[in-house]
């Protein structure tokens, strides 16, 4: 994806709540779709820190995988996420996300542009040896977990936008089992390492509750 934004390391983005009542239940909350998964059991053993593995290394490897998989899923439906169809970055009628630049100036941008900002920003971080060190002898920065939390904050917004705005396309591609499993893995990992704030999961809280009821989340 091409970058539109001069990355400055700011995590950016504000949630602008505009709660409204709606009688229409989103597809992703309706059976059988909400129960579709390619994983049996829960993710506890998958997300736990393995013995003799550095904690920051475990965070880095998993963040990189989540970024790539979410980017891949978004790419599969990106033709339907257009400036015309998604003029704002939203997660249903109750939530709009504003982008925050390096000067902490917020602005309303279309969803495809917002998501491009997010993916470009994460790619820049991953490629930064001082943030995601790959060479022997290089240490992770003291702020690494804060950086990972910032990445998770933005990635769950991408999840939320896809679920609320493009889940019909996920269904038409028969990807719901894989997408639901990726989300369950993401949330379970976020819980295990305290990477998600409660306010960030609100747009998908009902789905998380269903997954908790199904015993898939740890």
Image (cartoon, helix red, strand yellow):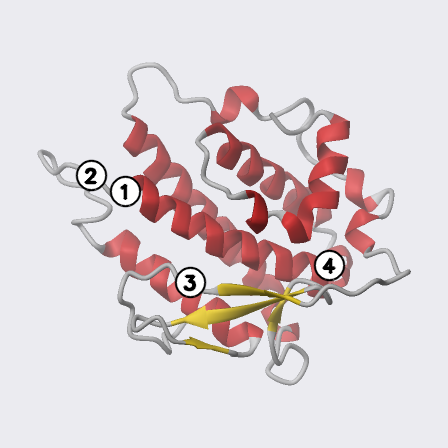
Give the Cα distance between marks 2 and 1: 6 Å
Q: Which mark is residue 167?
A: 4
Mark 3 or 1: the one toward you: 1
Mark 4 or 1: the one toward you: 1
In x, y percent, where is residue 31? Answer: 87, 43
Helix, strand or loop at mark 4: helix
In x, y percent, where is residue 181? Answer: 64, 39
Q: Quadrant of the C terminus?
A: top right
Query: Local crowd at mark 2 within 10 Å, few (<14), some, or many (≥20)?
Result: some
Q: Quadrant of the N terminus?
A: bottom left
Residue at point 43%, 64% (across, down): 118
Q: Earlier in the sequence, mark 3 or mark 2?
A: 3
Q: Which quarter of the picture shows residue 39?
A: top right
Q: Who is closer to the viewer here, 100 or 188?
A: 100
Helix, strand or loop at mark 1: helix
Q: Which mark is residue 119?
A: 3
Q: Left or right of 123: which side holds 210? A: right
Of all residues shown, which one is farthest toward the bottom? Answer: 84
Q: Which mark is residue 89?
A: none
Give the Cα distance between marks 4 and 3: 20 Å
Is residue 148 positioned above or below 164 on the image? above
Helix, strand or loop at mark 2: loop
Mark 3 or 2: the one toward you: 2
Residue at point 66%, 62% (across, down): 91
Give the Cα distance between marks 4 and 1: 32 Å
Q: Which mark is residue 140?
A: 2
Q: Earlier in the sequence, mark 4 or mark 3?
A: 3
Q: Earlier in the sequence, mark 2 or mark 4?
A: 2
Q: Which mark is residue 144?
A: 1
Give the Cα distance between marks 2 and 4: 37 Å
Helix, strand or loop at mark 3: helix
């Amino acid at each position: 994806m091409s970058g539109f934004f001069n990355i400055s390391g700011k995590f950016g983005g504000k949630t602008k709540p505009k709660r409204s009542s709606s009688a229409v239940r989103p597809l992703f909350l309706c059976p059988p779709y909400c129960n579709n998964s390619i994983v049996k059991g829960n993710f506890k053993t998958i997300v736990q820190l393995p013995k003799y593995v550095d904690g920051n290394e475990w965070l880095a490897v998993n963040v990189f995988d989540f970024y790539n998989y979410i980017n891949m899923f978004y790419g599969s439906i990106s033709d339907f996420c257009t400036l015309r169809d998604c003029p704002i970055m939203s997660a249903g009628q109750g939530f709009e996300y504003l982008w925050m630049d390096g000067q902490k100036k917020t602005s309303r941008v279309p969803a495809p542009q917002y998501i491009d900002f997010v993916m470009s920003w994460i790619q820049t971080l991953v490629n930064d040896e001082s943030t995601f060190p790959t060479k022997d002898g290089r240490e992770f920065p003291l702020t690494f977990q804060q950086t990972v939390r910032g990445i998770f904050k933005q990635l769950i917004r991408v999840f939320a936008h896809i679920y609320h705005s493009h889940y019909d396309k996920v269904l038409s591609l028969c990807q719901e089992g894989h997408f639901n499993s990726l989300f369950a893995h993401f949330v379970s990992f976020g819980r295990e390492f305290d990477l998600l704030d409660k306010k960030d999961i609100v747009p998908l809280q009902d789905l998380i509750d269903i997954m908790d009821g199904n015993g898939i989340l740890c």
